[in-house]
Image (tube, helix red, strand yellow):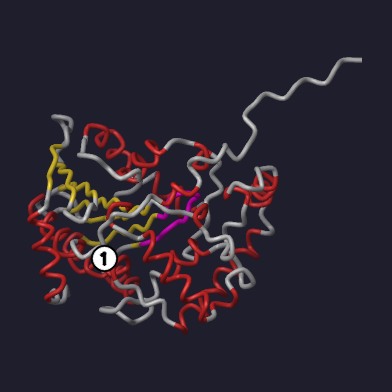
Amino acid sequence: GPGQQSLRQHPLVTTLRSQIYVMRTPVLSPPSRPRCSSPSLRAATESASRRALLSLCSALLATPTPSPAVAAAAAAAARGLQTFDIVASDLDRRSFRGMQLSNGLRVLLCSDPEAGKAAASMNVAVGSMSNPVEWPGLAHFCEHMLFLGTKRFPGEGEFERFIAANAGSNNAFTGSEETNYFFSVNGDALPGALTRFADFFTAPLFSESGTTREVDAIDAEHAKNLQSDFWRSDAVLRLRARPDHPYSRFFTGNRQTLRGGDADARAALFAFHRAFYRAPQMALAVAGPQSLDALQRLVQANFGALPPGPAPPASAAYDALPPPFDTQPQAEPPVA
């Protein structure tokens, strides 16, 4: 989708792709605006190792006093912190550091003292193939809802107002097996942006008014897709997939499948977020003009409160299934 394309073309992301392969961690868990569901067929069939790599390099890029709970989480993260050297070119003025917090969150830091901007992205290893059968479009709906208020910042649009006030931008996309959130902002605003961003993953509100209203945005996105040849061809592709494979299902969602954002939909959002938005299934990238030590402190203070595992990866529900499409070559019809 548009958000996915702009992210992958980001110059900092291009650099990260050339650097991240040297980062090695201990045992890793298998891993509008507009916002959209990605139709990528490759994501449905490639291996778990690719998902882990993508989750690490999928993105690059006022702070209130931390609560006692956040401070305690940061202290615990510091005790269990692991850091890793990242090999970079001798000509690269930037410096890099890999980390894994005690809760299992994997992090890549990039310090560029000459940069005027900062950026961050969180990749969550769950996408539309993990929608409950009775809730088509739930992963996409969850992505939208995280922008509509958190416990510390309950105002709808608070995050986007802060980003816009600091010359930034933000977006997100939901793919078949991953959901990605990202932003850029003036370098000196990174601490405030990260504090607001972290609450997406620790304390979303999923307010009643927000769920009812945001279903209309999902439905409008679906209606727009109906007129697109790209999305029509994607729908035909899904119709040809094995009916028992989640790739064959409806990904985007609409007002009908999400039941108008009623109380049951809100409960489903909480359950989905609680099950899959856990630190071992997430990877964070942060880039800014701050030093590596300063970036590390920001990450520990804001993301140490993410819920830890253990939790099976979202892909465990379908990894053992046959591929969604028949991979055997079709026999040629006899020549008359």
Q: Quadrant of residue 173?
A: bottom left
Residue 19 or residue 93, whichever sits in front: 19
At x 65%, y 26%, the residue is: 328
The quadrant of the picture occupied by the C terminus is top right
Q: Quadrant of residue 332?
A: top right
At x 14%, y 76%, the residue is: 67
Task: Name the residue carrying label 1.
Answer: 198
Q: Residue most toward the top? A: 336
Q: Is residue 102 magenta?
A: no
At x 52%, y 80%, the residue is: 212
Residue 135 or residue 182, whichever sits in front: 135
Classify 74 as above or below 105: below
Neighbour tally class for label 1: few under 14, some 14-19, many 20 plus, Cα within 10 Å: many
Classify 61 as above or below 139: above
Q: Residue most toward the bottom? A: 209
Left or right: residue 138 compared with residue 283: right
Main secondary structure found in the magenta portion? strand
Residue 151's spot in the image, x, y percent? 29, 79
Residue 308's spot in the image, x, y percent? 25, 59
Question: For the residue labelled by badge 1, is the local secondary structure a helix, a strand or a loop?
Answer: helix
Kind of residue sitting beneath label 1: Ala
Q: Is residue 178 magenta?
A: yes
Residue span colored magenta: 170-179
Left or right: residue 10 compared with residue 105: right
Residue 229's spot in the image, x, y percent? 68, 50
At x 32%, y 68%, the residue is: 200
Q: How many marks?
A: 1
Classify 18 as above or below 148: above
Residue 216 or residue 79, whichever sits in front: 79
